[in-house]
Amino acid sequence: MARKKAEVFVFSHLAYADGNRFVPSGILGLTETDGATVQNRELACEFAYGTRYLQRKEAFELDPVSLAFGEPEAIKGKVLYPVNGLGEFGGIRDAAPDAWGRRVIEARLKAPANGLLEVEYLLHAGGDRVGALDVRKQQASPDSTSASDLHSLQYVLQAAEAVDNGAAVPANLETFLGAGPSAGGARPKASVRDEEGALWLAKFPARNDTFDVARAELCTLELARRCGLTVPEVRYMDIGGRAVMLIRRFDRYWAQPGQDLPEGALHDTRPANGAVEGRLPFVSGLTLVGCRELESPDKAYSDLGQAIHKYVHPSRIRADGQEMFARMVLNIFVTNDDDHLRNHGFVRDPGVDGWVLSPLYDVVPRPVFASERRLHLGVGAQGKLATLDNALTHYAAFVPARPHAVGIMLRVWTEVRQWKICFEAHGADGKLLDQLTRAFRDISEVASPQLEAEIRKQVAWP
């Protein structure tokens, strides 16, 4: 197998007093084989920060695990390599297209499935990729954009359906494919801008769906909001009889250049006179845990808890630990077993100048008949077993005391037990409620009688 080497420029989107712009942050070197199958390919990466980039006070680390700043003088002019023997830098891998994005790029380039080298996927992910990075062939390469506007959503959907069905994309629809975002998995989707210019992720139906996934996900996220979790704005649209869910891109915000950041959640800010769009650096849970994608099933929520204590800004460790525990509890109640490490994220918040847990995304109930259920990630001492008793065995990775953990369970259960009321309030009909009933679990199904009694007596933890 031949080995191919490539060098590309990584850019970072920085906020300046006179506006926001991309600047070169370093050079990424990739060496990869071109084996006949993905399994036969090997990838090795190296990276060197640019000297000028390290001198910028606005600069941020591209990867808090493998490319941490530490002492800038110690890394100036040095070639850096991924930790733990990984082939990629997680922070840069998170700016690459996901499974769906790869299919979109292959459709645009008329390439076979997994037929491109990784450097090509990186280069073609587009300027609206997740986070605050861009990858370009030359230092002088121009900025690129990929998001269509909301009015053209029906054409974006048609193009996505062609890709999902493995059909050739009509020439008049190719421009609507945009770039595949890097977070969100294998389902059809695209970035779009609304009437004001705010960026959203539109999630389309897939050909094998057995229920209205768009409505189910929107309702579940609204249920999570009622549970006190951090959730971006979501919308539901019917495009020619096809269901589409839109979720605000939480890695984007709007602020006046050179002025203090607005109060409140940055992902809730809107375009306004004079405001410019900022980008928040993003890394997945996979990156912070420091492992390969194939190792995700071997990891646990406690690994995310440890990553929070190690990498999250000290002012947010307590709150983010509580929220991560609450998200695990919610996933137990709604049977969301697509909770792999890429479906947990972190953004770099300029308000605290550090990494924090991102808003919640990709939570869909899965109806099953089995009485014993498991999540993708480990829950506690009994492995992946989706019970509250199992979750309590590892509470110390998230909260300081057992009563706090039990109080969080009460808070989540108080809302989840009324899930049908929440779903109906957000447009779910009787058919969808019936289809999802087997996903939602009563407290008696996920807690021992002793723990259920303890939860009922506990005070809900904020």
Image (cartoon, rainbow, N blue to C red):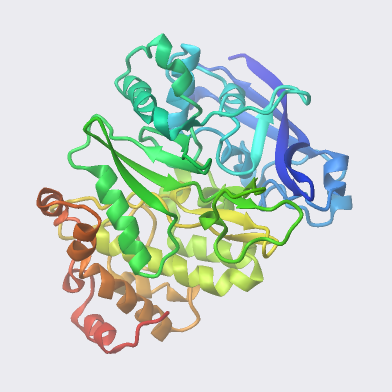
In the displayed structure, does residue 305 sit left or right of residue 383? Answer: right
Front position in the image: 275 or 226: 275
Residue 364 image position (x, y, % from top left): 30, 50
Q: Is residue 293 above or below residue 175?
A: below
In the displayed structure, does residue 302 sit left or right of residue 421? Answer: right
Q: Is residue 288 above or below residue 202?
A: below
Q: Is residue 382 visible?
A: no
Task: Examine the image and state in which quarter residue 12 appears.
Answer: top right
Residue 195 image position (x, y, % from top left): 47, 39
Residue 177 image position (x, y, % from top left): 45, 23
Task: Examine the image and state in which quarter residue 188 appears.
Answer: top left
Front position in the image: 105 or 179: 179
In the displayed structure, does residue 242 sit left or right of residue 13? Answer: left
Say which quadrant the C terminus sits in.
bottom left
Say which quadrant the N terminus sits in.
top right
Q: Is residue 441 above or below residue 118?
A: below
Residue 224 image position (x, y, % from top left): 35, 63
Front position in the image: 25 or 447: 25
Residue found at the very far front of the displayed protein = 273
Q: Is residue 209 visible?
A: yes
Front position in the image: 23 or 241: 241
- The residue drawn where x is 38% and y is 59% is 378
- The residue drawn where x is 42% and y is 34% is 150
